[in-house]
Amino acid sequence: MSDLDSRKKWVKVVKIEDIPILGARVVQAKQEKIALFRNSDNEVFAVEDRCPHKGGPLSQGIVHGKTVTCPLHAWNIDLQEGCALDPDVGCVKTYELKMEGSEIWLNLEERN
């Protein structure tokens, strides 16, 4: 695959300063919403904006470390893997991100 072909799946979505620290922004991609989270270390993560438990909006949850707590039933979701932490079970799709300067690019091909 050429470099040009590999860049086609990447879409520029926001600048890092558009995502509040310990907060989220939502982007619409295809037929689902993707939540972009920024933690206190300025790390950014992208996951499907739907809790695996009852479909709650993860983007409205509380970010702590590399985890978000669902606002509906307090499930904790690992933002790197997209999976609920014990004792809960279930996963959401995760998406690869890259930074170019302050711009955040999203790979629209889900990781899991």
Image (tube, rainbow, N blue to C red):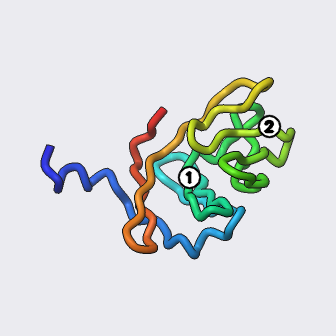
Look at the picture and state if 45 lies above or below 16: above
Q: Position of residue 46 (x, y in %)?
A: 55, 51
Q: Which residue is mark 1?
A: 45
Q: How many numbered marks does the figure carry?
A: 2
Task: Name the spot of residue 35 as percent of width and height, x first.
Answer: 60, 54
**Dot 1 surroundings within 10 Å: few (below 14), some, or many (20 or more)?**
many
Tell me the residue at 55%/58% (across/down): 44
Residue appearing at x 13%, y 49% in the figure: 2
Rendered residue at 74%/52% (across/down): 64
Q: Amino acid at mark 2?
A: Trp
Tell me which label, 2 or 1, sits earlier in the chain. Answer: 1
Q: From this view, report whether residue 97 is shown above or below residue 72.
A: below
Quadrant placement of the N terminus = top left
x, y percent for residue 20: 67, 70
Contact (CB < 8 A) between labels 2 and 1? no
The local secondary structure at tag 2 comes to: loop
Foreground of the two, 55 or 84: 84
Distance between the alpha carbons at the discs numbered 2 and 1: 17 Å
Name which quarter of the figure residue 39 lies in: bottom right
Quadrant position of residue 59 = bottom right
Q: Name which residue lies at 40% across and 73% down.
A: 101
Give the crowd class for mark 2: few <14, some 14-19, many >=20 residues within 10 Å. many
In the image, 17 versus 55, the foreground residue is: 17
Q: Which mark is residue 75?
A: 2
What secondary structure is marked by label 1?
strand
Res. 55 image quadrant: top right
Residue 48, compared with residue 37, is above or below; it is: above
